Every structure is written in C-alpha cells, then in structure tokens.
Image (cartoon, helix red, strand yellow):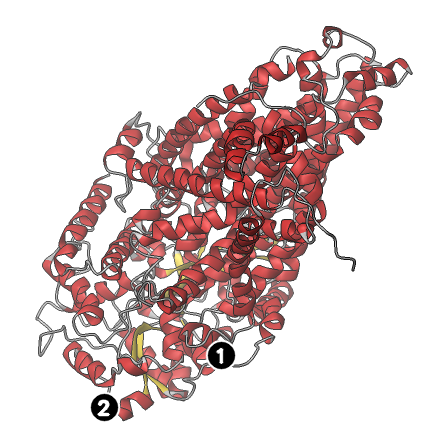
Amino acid sequence: MKKIKRQRNSQDILPPTVRIIATVFLLVFALIPVIYTVLLSVTPDSEITSGENLIPSHWAFSNYIQMWTSVNLAQGLFNSLLISLTASAIAVVLAVGAGYVISRFKFFGRMPYLYSLIGLQTVPGVMLLLPLFVLFASAQAALHFKLVGTYQAVIVTYLTFALPFAIWLMVSYLSSIPIDLEEAALVDGATRLQALWSVIVPLALPGVVVALVFSFLTGWNDVLFASVLTSPETRTIAVQLQAFSSAQEGGALPLYGQLMGASIVSALPVVILYMVFQRYLIGGLTAGGVKG
Amino acid sequence: MSIQPIPETGPESPPSISGAQIPKRTSSRSAGGRPIWLMWPSAIMLFVIVGLPFLIALYISFLNLDQYTLRSWIHAPWVGLENYVESFTAGNIVGTSTLVSLGVSFGFAILTTAFITPIGILAALTVNTPFRGRGVVRALYLIPYVIPTFVTALVWRMMFLNKTGLIDRFLAGIHVANINTYWLLGPNSFWAMIITDVWASWAFIYIMVLAGLQSIPADMYDAASVDGANSWQRLTRIVLPQLRGILGLALLLSTLNHFNNFTLPFVMFGTPPPVQVDVLPLNIYVSSFQLFNFGLGGAMSVITLLIMLIPGIFYIRTIRLGEVTV
Amino acid sequence: MKASNRLIGICSCLIVLLPLVLTGCGGSSGSGSNGTGQTLHVLVGANTTFATQQKQWMQQINNEFHKETGATIAWDTNTGGSSGEQTQLQTAMVSGSGPDVFDMGTTFVPTAQATKGFVTLTADDWNKVGGKSRFFPQQMTMSGSSPSQDIAVPWNMSPYAMVYNKDLFKKAGISTPPTTWNDFVTDAKKMTDPSAGVYGAEIDPSDSFDPWKIWWTFNQQAGGGSFLSPDLKTAELNSPTAVNSAKFWFDWATTFKIADPTSMTWKSSDATSAFGNGKVGIMIMTTPTIIPTLQKSAAAGKYAFAPMPTVPYGMQQRPANGVPAATIVSGEMLAVASYSNVQDLAFKFINLVTDYQHQLDWTKTFGDLPANVQAANYLSSKDPETAAFVKAEQNATPTPFSGEWGPLEVSLASVSSKLANSVATNHYNPSQIKPLMDQANQEIQSKLHH
C-alpha cells in the first residue's frame, strides 16, 4: 500500500491528537460490550455464574450448536425475515404513494393528515396492545377467518406502525425533487403513475432505502405485539429470545452462554443490513429529519 | 431556543428545490389528474391499526376493567375520571403513581439525550474528513445503534450484574468501587438504564450531525482557516451554529423515542421493576397486564399521550411542515 | 385516465388486503363440520430446558389423539413465562377467542375463575376426564372455588421441598436435615464459608414468586394464616407474623449471614445455578422439576431432598394455630375455555394426558409428579425420593381461592424487590418492612372491596 500523505483539511475541526484519542475512546466504548457478549457466548455457563475468571477455561463453542435446539432460532429468524421484509416493502410502496400526493397536491385533509402522522407516532405501543388484539379477534369472528397468529396479522400491524415515519420521510424527500422532471414525462404522455415510477422513485432512491431499512427494524425489534399476535409457527426471533431468557423462571438453569450466542445471531441480520446501506442512511435520514 | 430554517441539501439528495417553489398549477388538475387515492391505503391502515385501537383504549380508560369484567369488556362499569384521579393519587397496587413514573421517564429521556449529544457530535467530527480506515470506523460506530433493543438489554444486564459483571470487575480492578456494587437494584439502576441507552443511541445523534456537517459549505471552513481560527473557535463559531437546526430536531426526536422506550427497561430489569426505573410504559404494562387494572393502565396511557404531544407539537412547528410544501 | 388510475388504486388496496382474505379462506376450510377435520387449540407453557423432548411429546400426543378422535391438536406455547401466560389469557378473555384448553399454574386458577370465561365442570364432565377419583385430592382443592364450581383439572403437581448438598452436610458434620427453622439456621451457619463462596442457605429476593411462597409458608407455620382471611374479605398482609416472615428471610443475608449477601438480584434460577455449582448448602422451596437440571450440574449425585422445616424460628414446636404447610398445593392444571366450540374434544384431550400411562411418561421426561393418584402411588413405590414428595403433597396447604391472589403475588414481589433495594444500597433496616406491608395490605384490601 502506498502511504498517503495527508494534508490537514480545513474541515478538520479536531486537532489530530484529539481526533485519534476520541476515535479510540469511542471505538472502545462501542465495542467492549460487543466483545464481552462474544466472550460470554463461548464461556461455559458455570463459569459465567461463578464469576471467577473473565477468560474461560475452555471455549464452549457447543453453545452455538445447542442453542438451535434450546430455542427455535432458525424458525424465528425465518419468520422475522419474512415478516419484516414483507411489511417494510409494502410500507414503502404505500409511503411513496402517500408522500407523492402530499408533496404535490393541495387537498382537503392534507394538513390534518400530516399532523395526525406525528400524533400517531407519539401513541405508546403498550396502550394499543389489548385493543388491537380485540380488533383482530372481532374481525376474525365477524368474517370467519383466522387472523390472530397468522403472518398477515403481524405484517399488517408492523407495516402500519412503520407508516408514519416512512410517509414523513417520503414527503420530505419527494418535495425536494424538482417538479419539472415529472412534468416533462407527463407532457411525453406518461400517466402520473408511470411518471412516479420511472422518474420520481429512482431519484428518491436514497429516501426509499432509508424508509425500507427503518420499516424493517420496526418489525425486527418488536417484542410486545409479536408476543400476542403470533402463534408458535409464526413467532419472531425477538419473541423467541425473550421467551428463552424468561424461561428460567421455571427453575431451569440460566443458559447465559447460549442466550448470548442467540443474541448475536439475532442481531447479525440487522447489523449486516445497516452496513450494506450505510451510505444511504446518513443522507436519507437527514433529509427526513431535517425537512420532514 | 429558536430553530432556524435548515438548508435542504442532504449529501445524497438531489439539488434541492424547496417545496414552496412548487408551481401553483400542479396543484390544479394538470395532465395525469390528481391521484389522491394513493393516500387511501395508508390512511385506512393507520385508522384501522392505530386509530381504532387508540379510541378503544381511550374508552377503556373510563372503565373499571379488571379480571371480573374482562370477558364482556364493553359492559364494564363506567367510572368516569376515577382512573385518572387514582393514577395520580395512588398509582397501581405496587404503589408507583403516574407522577413518579413521569419523573423517571422525563429524567431518563432528558438525561440520555443530554449525554448522547456531545458524544454524537464528537463522533461525527472524528470521521467528517477522509482518512485511511474511515469507512471501517464509521461502520463500527453504527454497531451499538443497530443491535436490536432486546439484545442490548440482555447484554447490558449481564454487564451490570453485581460481582460477576464486567462493570463491577472493572470498577473493582481500578479500585473505584466495591466488586459487589449493585447496578440492577436501587438508585444505581436508574444510571444503569441511562448508560445502556446512551451506548445504544448515541449513534443517532452521530448520524444526524454527520449528515449536517456534510451540508456545511466548504468555503465557510476555508474562510475561518484564513482568519486563523483555532479548533475550538471553528467548532463554536461555524459548526455548531450551522448544526443548530438539525441538532434541535435530533434532540427532540431522541427525547420522544427515549420517553416511549418500553423494551429496554422491561427486558433489562423484569417486572416488577425497581421504582427508579419504573418508566411510564412499563408502569402501564404492569398495571394492565399483571395487576389486571386495564382502566388504570388506559388512563396512564392517555396521560402519556397528552404529554408526548407537547414535544410533538413543538416538533411540527419546528420543521414547518406547512411552509415546506404548501 | 383518471378512471384507470382509480382502478389501479382499488387494485392496490386489494393486493394489500388479499393475503388476509386468502389465509382466511384457508383457515376456515380446514375445519370441517364433522369431528374428523376438527382442530383443538391447546396452550401449554414452553419448556426450554427440554425443548426437544417437549416437541416430541407434543408430536406423540397429537398422533394418539388423532388416532382416537380423528381431530388434530394445534399447540400453542406461551412466551415470556407467567406474564406471557397471563397476557394470553387476558387477550383470549377480552376477545372471546383463543386456545380451547389452557394450561395454568394452580395459584392462577382463582384469577382465571374470576373471569368467568371457563367451563364449570359438571359431574358428567368429570367423568369424561376419568372421574374425580383419578386425581390427587389435595390438587383438587385448587380446581375451583367450591367442589360444585370446579373449572380446572389437575395435570401434574410439583410439591415443594428443600434440596441439600450431601457433601457440604458431611463436611459440616450434619447427619440429618433440619426440621425446625432454628436448626436450619444453625446447620446453615456450620456450612457457611464465605472465603470459599459457600453459603449454607440462599435467598432470591428478585424472583417474582419465591418471596411470597416462602413468606406465606413462614406465616402459616407461625399461625398467621394465608395473607387473606378465611372468608377472603380481609387482607392480612401486615400482621405481625407476616412482617416477621419477611424479616426472618432477609435475616438470612443480613443478620445470620447464611445466604450470599451479593444475591439481591437473584431469581430462582440463579439460586439453582449456585446450588448446582456446589456453593449452596440447602436450597428451599424447590420442586422435583429441577432433578433433571441438577443431574447435568456439578452437584449431580451429591444432592438429596427433604421436607422443609415446619417449626417457626425461635420456637421449639409449632403454635397451636400453626399449619405445617410443608408445601403449597402447586402444579399445573388444565381448563377449558367457555367460548370453545370443541369442548368435547377438549375433555378427551384432558382425559388422554391425565391417564395412568401418559402421566408416568410425563414424569419420566419432565420431572413433575403425576396428578394421577394411581401413577403417583406407583412411582412412590419405586423410588423413595418420589415417595417423600408424594407424602409431602398429602399434607399440602392450598393458597386462598381469591381472584385477587394474582395481584397479591405481584404486590409481595414488589415488597421483596424494595427490601432487596435497601439491602443492596446498605440502607436496610427491618423496620422498613411494616410500612411496605401496610401499603400492600391497603391496596389489596381496596381491591377486595371492589
């Protein structure tokens, strides 16, 4: 590697030494719990609870094998992926539609709608748990089909929870895209939808990606709703893990090593997702935060 | 604190044209019509999945809904504002009233935000300009933020265990505290919760500030360099004023998010939690689902909502939704 | 063009809603009108210690059930322990839909009965599940508020006892397990060696259930009753004996120093794990359920069970009004939801899992004792350890059958957690107990009046 000679940039606010110290400090702060988790995940349980040595006497890699049977990790991962991906995809499609209309047209109910998006974001989730279940159950009884415990019920719930932020992001993003571009397309004979799809969406891609990622996380992170809306077949990884950690109530030995291993596995998909889309996130998020 | 209108350009967004400049004619019927229906699916879903349950919860907050009346909840006795009064005077049977939980929630939300702000700014400044390995550092900075909350809570519970956890080992190692310092009980638990949330969320401020930094025109820095301003002067005279808008919003959003954080204390401390970490959402959960007092839980929820609306309204005014697009 | 747009809009709405409708059809077509196509939904607690075994057991029961009735079982396991159990019951009651059969702990039955959402068992119903005589009589005391108002059928039982480390006993020169709490403290002191991290006893004040169970037992033995008056109308949480019960337990860590002073955050699993590591001499309030767990620990083969002491601390014999309360009537029961439209199948299921052979199989795999008398007798004739538990169960004392018992448990857990807070911060003083119990008493009393 060629050594790059660095000239001090006028945008460097921090003096080089401060910058290095700060970077190291922040990295240590950020990573120590992660490293500790990895360490615990390969420590035999008896050594975690006795707390004698930090470094285990032997590496208990078997934790990573046993945990797949102790807790239904594989199915949880599959369910979480399926639910979160579907929910975020639909949420983004709906948000693009709503965001487009709101950013382009004046109509009755537009401002109330925008305001209510913010209002809805402040509703505490715990408050909705029981009523939402009542609603699903009543719909189930009235329409004679199974709803509670199906993928659909959870997907619809998560996608709706993701909507306010996603719409918001899209409103701010789309309103920064020059109107001339789509007008040109309209003049060329495209329909509104064609113009939206072929002109606007590609331009708004960073925003779309951010909306997608954040919507995905809404589903991935939830413990509360999934615990009553899912059945064993549709249970998400978050609930599996929560059940695993609280199962010790029954007098079972705490399986800390496996718990930490399972935690790592369940965090991995999200970490990868973020890393892949990191570039978009910073741009997309500010646009949403700043203007939306 | 007044928040300035913010420069619209994000690094990834196209050259900006403020919505205010949308030509009037587009809002009339032009080619392609007005596909207002694009809004319907989202509006309907929000109404059904959030709006209706919210109205039901509001109704429940006026009922005496417990294990005896749960089965025919629609006919549960109407008690008016009794639940609201009870929530302030007595609280649930564990004895934590709304006021106590409000204090905990506010303290938690505000302190966490106060701590993550300088950390986030500092982090953004360290990776604002290119250096070898910047991509890696940026990615590593994000890790705590992207780890799901329930995992964060489990991990930090292990970190904070007295005697065997990493924190106590470290503090005892440097002779600051007894190896058997309790972090998951007593007043320390409040700080344990804050430290955990600071770890998990500073990257939010970092992301916002980083994006804000990149929208500061380079010539502003150059001018300052020519003037011979030192690091501190450049930070306080150029960077912070330019970031004021975005920071204000980041702080508001952050406070809102922390206020509503249920998963972290729930997984980290279990139920019933130490009173020092009995945040409102957790109190609502315990009152409703463990003590079967759904009316009381409903009343606490409505109170939470009303309180949350204050920063919410502030937020709406700040971002000037109306101005941007109409 | 406008019209076509609207069409697309409607289509997109349909696309969103279509999956819902589709599964709906799929779901309803699954259940035919005759008995063979029917599905029985059963909610049981998830067992993570024996996850694989539980899955196999479910599969096996399902096969047999299908052979017998032509119907299938859809298993639902509750998540999040007892709070998950509660949430699932609440959502089911409030919506009138959910599992057909609920598995619940004995002390939760009164709360379940308060919802009036479960089938009251008629004599005919009892016959469908093998008759009342099939079950352990003590367990039946928690079946319902009165013999004519039963809602729950005993499934398995987990009588409480204490488990001790034989090696530590030998080292301290203790020949027989203590039968009075005085002896208990003395013996525990002999075994305690803080430098080795070994303590004669343990406490787990952050557990959600152990504190109330232990205090309740102390209180019963001292003649203080069961926290509620016999007519279930008066709360008695702040009586002198009740306050003393809590004090005596915390004394183990604070005064006698026979329990690890660093254990304030412990839940029962932490105590089990310390016992498994050979760091605890006697662990009280434990059940045969932990045998398979201990077998896998370092204490394997070094432990034995004994009944908990029944003579209060500071006394040579139990006061006249004291109750031995060797164990609480404890275990799992099965109840049928009244909204269920396959109640006959539900009873057939209960009949299946409570019969002699299935009860024996259950114990072999999971460790709990059978609630089936015949099976329990067979097991105790085979194994003295089981015999001790079965004998303890014959003297078991039921907890009050009150719909407020669930909240009462939570309020005592909260008192314990607050006291643990004080100990953890070195502010503990036994005088703090009375005000906390007063407050808990007042809150429970106000709920009883409702």
Residue assigned mark 1: C364
The image shows residue C340 at horizontal and vertical percentages of 51, 48
Identify the residue at image location x=34%, y=83%: C387
Crowd tier of the residue under label 1, counting other residues whose Cα lies within 10 Å: few below 14, some 14–19, many 20 or above:
some
Q: Quadrant of residue A39?
A: bottom right
Visible residue check, residue A88: no
Amino acid type indicated by mark 1: Lys
Amino acid type indicated by mark 2: Ile
The image shows residue A290 at horizontal and vertical percentages of 59, 28
Of the residues tagged 1 and 2, which is closer to the observer?
A: 2
For the residues marked 1 and 2, what is the alpha-carbon distance in whole angstroms? Answer: 31 Å
Identify the residue at image location x=74%, y=53%: A4
Judge whether C331 appears above or below A150 on screen. below
Left/right placement of residue B234 relative to residue C227 reads: right
Left/right placement of residue B197 relative to residue C224 reads: right
The image shows residue A73 at horizontal and vertical percentages of 62, 61
Judge whether B116 appears above or below C274 on screen. above
Q: Is mark 2 on a helix, strand or loop?
A: loop
Q: What element carries label 1?
A: helix
Judge whether C98 appears above or below C66 on screen. above
Q: Nearer the viewer, residue C19 or C283?
A: C283
Q: Quadrant of residue C166?
A: bottom left
Residue assigned mark 2: C174
Q: Which chain is indicated by disc 1?
A: C
